[in-house]
Image (tube, grey):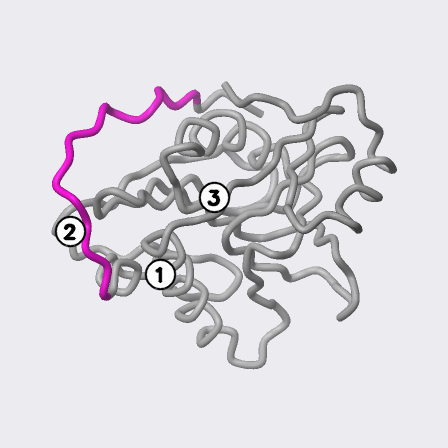
Amino acid sequence: MRDALARGMTVEEYFRLEEGSPVKHEYVAGEVYAMSGATLRHNLIAGSIFGALLGAERGGPCRVVMGDMRLEVASDKYYYPDVVVLCSAVAKLDVVARGPCVVVEVTSPSTARVDRSEKLDAYRQIPMLLAYLIVDHRRRRVERHWRDVPGSDWQREEIAGDMQGAVPVPCLDASLTLDEIYRRVDLPSVSEPDSLEYDSDVD
């Protein structure tokens, strides 16, 4: 469970806080959470994903943005995902993105549980979202949640270890390999418990 920095804050108050704060905060139903700094490993993984997907834009209608852009997940939820694929209109001076097609979160020791529980539930409620990728920071593993079209059932798979299969990225008609994602990243040898049980009945 995360510890809230503030409780009972309105969305308007949260926006004003973000305008003047050097630290980014996420907002969940009145509760505000400060975001801690990321490790070099986290940044390398997120940067490799961003670079690969940026090259896949190819002048199409979708754009790839990194984690400094706030994402409206619901009217009372705002997160800063590591990488987002947007196919809806976004002005160059906008500070809030809406209607993503793909969301990518790279885990960290402080966020892994939230990424696989709270954020998984929240992201799957976004009407236009087609894929949510949870990229492990400790071993070669991507947990992919996806659906074929908006409104269809969510599915789940893992691409891990030495698997050569690619991770499909909808809307860009692209894919990512584990070699691309973990390029030049030294990973520790660790054991990790199985991911949380996946409930395919969530709307």
In the rendered structure, the answer to whether residue 46 lies left or right of residue 18 reads left
**What's the CA distance linking mark 1 and mark 3?**
19 Å
Secondary structure type for disc 2? loop
Q: Name the residue under label 2.
A: 163
**What's the CA distance linking mark 1 and mark 2?**
21 Å
Compared to 86, does 98 lie above or below?
above
User: Which is nearer the eye, 64 or 17?
Assistant: 17
Question: Do tag 2 and tag 3 residues touch (Cβ < 8 Å)?
Answer: no
What is the quadrant of residue 75 in the picture? Answer: top right
Compared to 54, does 19 lie above or below?
above
In the rendered structure, the answer to whether residue 196 lies left or right of residue 14 reads left
Q: How crowded is mark 3: few (under 14 residues within 10 Å), some or many (20 or more)?
A: many
Q: Mark 3 points at which residue?
A: 132
Q: Position of residue 127 (x, y in %)?
A: 66, 40
Question: Do tag 1 and tag 2 residues touch (Cβ < 8 Å)?
Answer: no
What amino acid is labelled 3 in the image? Tyr
Instruction: Name the disc covering residue 176, or none.
Output: none
Secondary structure type for disc 3? strand
**What's the CA distance linking mark 2 and mark 3?**
20 Å
Ranked by sequence position, the earlier of labels 1 and 2 is: 1
Compared to 202, does 34 lie above or below?
below
Tell me the magenta residue range.
184-199
Q: Mark 1 points at which residue?
A: 44
What amino acid is labelled 2 in the image? Met
Which residue corresponds to the image point at 74% horizontal and 53% vertical from the top-left?
96
